[in-house]
Image (spheres, rainbow, N blue to C red):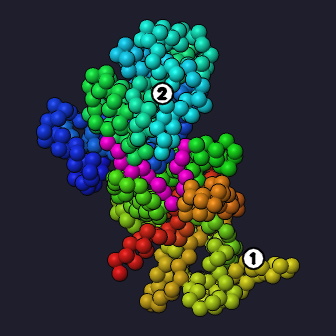
Amino acid sequence: MKTPDTKQTVPPPNFIRSIVAQDMKTDKYDGRVVTRFPPEPNGYLHIGHAKSICLNFGIAAEHKGGICNLRFDDTDPSKEEMEYVESIKSDVRWLGFDWEDRQFFASDYFEELYHYAVQLIKAGKAYVDSLSAEEIRKYRGTLTEPGRESPYHDRSIDENLDLFSRMRAGEFNDGAHVLRAKIDMASGNMLMRDPTLYRIRHVSHYRTGDKWCIYPMYDFTHCLSDSIEGITHSICTLEFEINRQLYDWVLDELKVYHPQQIEFARLNLTYTVLSKRKLIELVERGHVTGWDDPRMPTISGLRRRGYTPASIRNFCERIGVAKRDSMVDVALLEYSVREDLNKHAPRVMGVLRPLKVVIDNYPEGKVEELDAENNPEDSSAGKRKILFSRVLYIEKEDFMEDPPKKFFRLTPGREVRLKHAYYIKCSDIVKDEKTGEVIEVHCTYDPKTRGGWSEDGRKVRGTLHWVSAGHALKAEVRLYDHLFAQENPSETKTGADFKSFLNPNSLERLTSCLVEPSLADAAPGSRYQFLRQGYFCVDSKDSSATALVFNRTVTLRDTWAKIQRAREK
């Protein structure tokens, strides 16, 4: 199978790798390792799914002959669409994984699943119940009280077979009957109190059309799909631990091939929600612009924002695989992308809030070509030419008329370095007559400091980025912050709705930015480091040859590294 190249040849141990290694040692599955990634095609994948993708494909790749299937558990026709199928496939491929010819759908197994259900009826292990959904809930009992058997619990096998056949034939309305497993209404695991296996739904399925009007429940479908595909290790998140008893019951009662279900802790990320229901609500109520909004934790949103596949894979490896839920600091995710982009992203200059600078002693009309390195972390990246002229733009925040102590950027009478260019010194300023705001800075330059270094060895403390006024390109820059202002927006003990924690400053649009001319042909999705500003990505939707749009992927500030240093002290 195709897997991404990584520097780590020996992955770190975890309890799932230990289980698989032991099974290989004892030849439990005849030396096979077959995993699967089984998304439901009713939404877009997010960073939590990435953890599962990396784990399932990674475990398979670590063993000779190991394979990982991509299976769509599509048993709820009211919410599933081919759009989601295609987006899921695109995201898995983008992360660097390939399922080759092993793309499966639970809907492909509907006929087999139906016959398995008939087999349970014939064995006296399933019955057709005619209680309403509300009545079934009442009969199920509570955590402290056992449930009661349905009045239809003891229907004869022949009656159950007849009713189930007529359910399939479409004779009954939605909710008229369900097929339930006959297990134990007094079980301490409420899921085992005669769980529903099939329900009637007169809804067209995105793949099977109107062929079916009864659909199997997830728990019944999932274990049998694993069995049909010969999965060895059915790896899922911790909330399915309680479902494992039913998983085992179905396979044991049917006496079919039995994979092993193993649960691990799902990903919880600070300042983020990963509940599919909540993400859908954010999209449908217009709190974000769509599933690929760069503030969303979806794979498509992270991709649009400028995250790299390697950074997400490295993040998933770093957080590890645990048996208990915990909260991961989003700073670690940001560290992972910053670390990757630092190695590969070309350096360019972009001015987000321009302030005009006129170099009075530089010849009018003269344009100079200067050399600038593309990436100091990559010796093979080479150099590019940048244009220098009499009129430039710098960042507004890089000039102060009356600076505080330890402000080492441009001020009246102070000399600073222009990156890759010259030393300049502020000699005068021009203010807006009405507001008093500085709108233009006049400077002189030292022609003996070409390249940003002084021949006489004198040093300056401030280095500024800049662009040439006559050559710079206009651009829109979108500065993104966390979508939520609270560290754990899902923690609503006070009863507050999670949306009340939305960060009103999660997006700032700057429409008067200027970038160096080398970005004229920047392709959508291209990633760069804007010197001193952070890492940016050309927006894949809104950017064009005539309207450059950049999304800030992450700032240069490394919060996670600071946390780690503090811990070491």
Q: Counting residues from the N terminus, which is met first, the one under dot 2 or under dot 1?
A: 2
Q: Quadrant of residue 437?
A: bottom right
Residue 345: in sight, yes or no?
no
- Numbered disc 2: secondary structure: loop
Disc on res. 149:
2
Q: Residue furthest right?
A: 434
> Where's residue 376, x and y in %?
39, 67
Q: Which residue is mark 1?
A: 439
Q: Quadrant of residue 97?
A: top left
| Residue under the image location 59 percent in, 91 percent down | 405
Count of numbered labels shown in the rendering: 2
Name the amino acid type tagged 2: Glu
> Where's residue 62, x and y in %?
23, 43
The question of residue 269 being in magenta is answered with yes
Name the amino acid type tagged 1: Ile
| Residue under the image location 51 percent in, 37 percent down | 141
